[in-house]
Image (cartoon, rainbow, N blue to C red):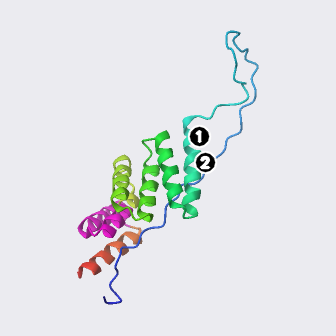
Amino acid sequence: EPEDTPTAVPTATLTLEPTATLTPEPAATNTPVPTDTPDPTPTNTPTPDKQSLFDEKMAEARNYADNAEWNRAKTAFAEALDLDPESSRAYYNLGHTHLELGDTSQAIENFNKAIELDPQNAVYYMDRGNAHGESGNLAAAVEDYTKAIELDPADARFYFNRALVYKTQGE
């Protein structure tokens, strides 16, 4: 095989979301506790809401991904999706994790869901294009890179990846 012919389309670096901002605990209140409550929850200890749990799980998953602990990242991103099944970020990151693990079909499925939830995110198309390229579906890869270019024409990565596919195809 000639040295200048790429064998795989390079994958993008995992785009990680910033960690959650911690908010101070609310001050204790003097609200009376109803007498019929057998074991009242102290008013100064808030119960974590679903969003906080989701943010914590995403931070845990990102930490695993940062350390290339892909199987642990996969589990944590899936757990985050259990908490927020409408999170395009979680689907995207889970897709990228599957791509790192070599499971292109599962990666594409997760990227599809991320794109369904956030169709204006060009990076989602780029990484789905990378997954298509790795699976050998170069026509689909070109389509995704072209869509990414349409959404964000200033990002050179999209042009670069599309050019690599064209070169692989001999165009």
Q: Whole-percent x and y of residue 59? A: 58, 51
- Tag 1 residue: 52
Does residue 27 lie above or below 94 as drawn? above
- Residue for point 45% across, 65% down: 100
Residue 54 at x, y = what percent? 54, 43
Which portion, as a residue range, is magenta? 126-153
The label number, if any, that marks residue 20 in the structure image: 2
Name which residue type carries label 2: Ala
Q: Main secondary structure of the magenta part?
A: helix
Q: Relative to the observer, which residue lies in front, 44 or 1?
A: 1
The residue under the point 59% across, 46% down is 56
- Mark 2 is surrounded, within 10 Å at the Cα level, by few (under 14), some (14 to 19) or many (20 or more) other residues, namely few
Callout 2 secondary element: loop
Count the marks: how many?
Answer: 2
From the top left corner, tell me how far across and down residue 9 is, in percent: 36, 73
Q: Tell me the quadrant of the picture where the N terminus can be found.
A: bottom left
Which quarter of the figure is the C terminus placed in? bottom left
Residue at figure coordinates x 37%, y 69% from the top left: 158
Task: Decide if residue 149 is in sight here.
Answer: no
Q: Quadrant of residue 129?
A: bottom left
Is residue 142 within the magenta segment?
yes
Kind of residue sitting beneath label 1: Ser
CB-based contact (under 8 Å), mark 1 and mark 2: yes
Q: Residue furthest front?
A: 71
Q: Is residue 157 left or right of residue 139?
A: right
Q: Nearer the viewer, residue 147 or 89?
A: 89
Residue 14 vs 59, above or below: the answer is below
